[in-house]
Amino acid sequence: MEKEKITITAIQMESIIGNKKANFDKVANLIDNNLKQNTDILILPELWNVGWACDKFIGAAEELENSETINFLANFAKKYNTNILGGSFVNKINDKYFNTCPVINRKGELIATYNKNHLYSYYDDSEGTYITKGNNPVIVNIEGVKIGLTICYDIRFPEIYRAYRKAGADILVNMAAWPLSRAIHWNSLTQARAVENQTYMVALTQTGILPTGAKNLGHSLIYDYSGNILDEINSIEGSVSATINLFDMYEFRDKCTVLKDIQDSYEVLYNE
């Protein structure tokens, strides 16, 4: 373990639907006014540059090469000497579109991407109509700290988080645009992912009103490896920040080795 402690700042915002320039200006202002001193990792929410409006996705798409979103984030990485998990943007690859998280290091270099593995297409949402699902979870190693990346709907699938934990993840991150109508789900699932995997968890979502009149939840949190809340924010724009102690987490895992009790198989027997 190269680092014992790491400082994280996550920005909660209300995206202006379909207006990339306005969202760039808003994020710039939020970062300038909310970034905790000596932040090692800055995190943004899902689709912050366009907002959650599925019919706007294709028009907002960019290619990795010459991406204005990545270039924007790279400048802030260098300005503040911080790594960035860039939420997500619509990434065009050939004739397909992905909901992609870019990871940028302190030098402004793109070092990894994660394509959302689970697409939400229920209750009048239609992400799967426009977006192609990713096929693999991605752990990114940032200065010796291993981070498992997920986006929004991924939170409902504990399998991906357990895979990250087994692969050595220190921190789990979910970058979302989560609805107020499913607040109980968000709070329960994000805390559970931290507890069941004995892992720090950053749960970041957008706030604000959507074109349908529905609202984003705007309840972002950082949990420790026992599910304790280290920081949280309600529906306002702003940030959550925490300096987390990886040594404490590993010491806890050594004392409570629950993952060793996982069985090789859970075949269900029917008794009719």
Image (cartoon, rainbow, N blue to C red):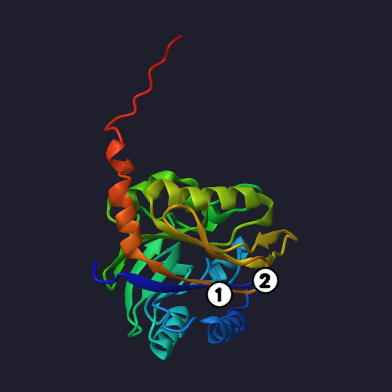
Question: For the point 30% across and 36% down, which residue is it?
Answer: 261
Give the image location of residue 246, x and y in percent. Answer: 33, 64
* Residue 123 horizontal side relative to residue 202, left or right: right
**Local crowd size for mark 2, using a 10 Å CA cut-off: few (<14), some (14–19), many (≥20):** some
Q: Which of the 4 quarters of the picture holds residue 199?
A: bottom left
User: Nearer the viewer's eye, disc 1 or disc 2?
Assistant: 2
Judged from the image, the secondary structure of the residue bearing numbered disc 2 is: loop
Local crowd size for mark 1, using a 10 Å CA cut-off: few (<14), some (14–19), many (≥20): many
In the picture, the disc for residue 49 is 1
Task: Please tell me which residue is depicted at 58% across the width and 82% down the height of the picture.
Answer: 30
Q: In this rendering, would 272 be left or right of 264?
A: right
Q: Is residue 175 visible?
A: no
Q: Amino acid at mark 2?
A: Ile
> Which of the numbered marks, if any, corresponds to residue 24?
none
Image quarter of the N terminus: bottom left
Q: Residue furthest top?
A: 272
- The amino acid type, in three-letter code, at marker 1 is Asn
Are circles 1 and 2 on residues that touch, CB within 8 Å? no
Residue 250, percent from left and from top: 30, 57
Q: Is residue 190 visible?
A: yes
Q: Residue 119: image x %, image y %?
A: 50, 52
Depicted 228 relative to depicted 264: above or below? below
Compared with 68, 2 (above or below) is above
Q: Which mark is residue 236?
A: 2
Per the model, the C-alpha gap separating discs 1 and 2 is: 18 Å
Query: Residue placed at 65% from the left, 65% from the top?
Result: 234
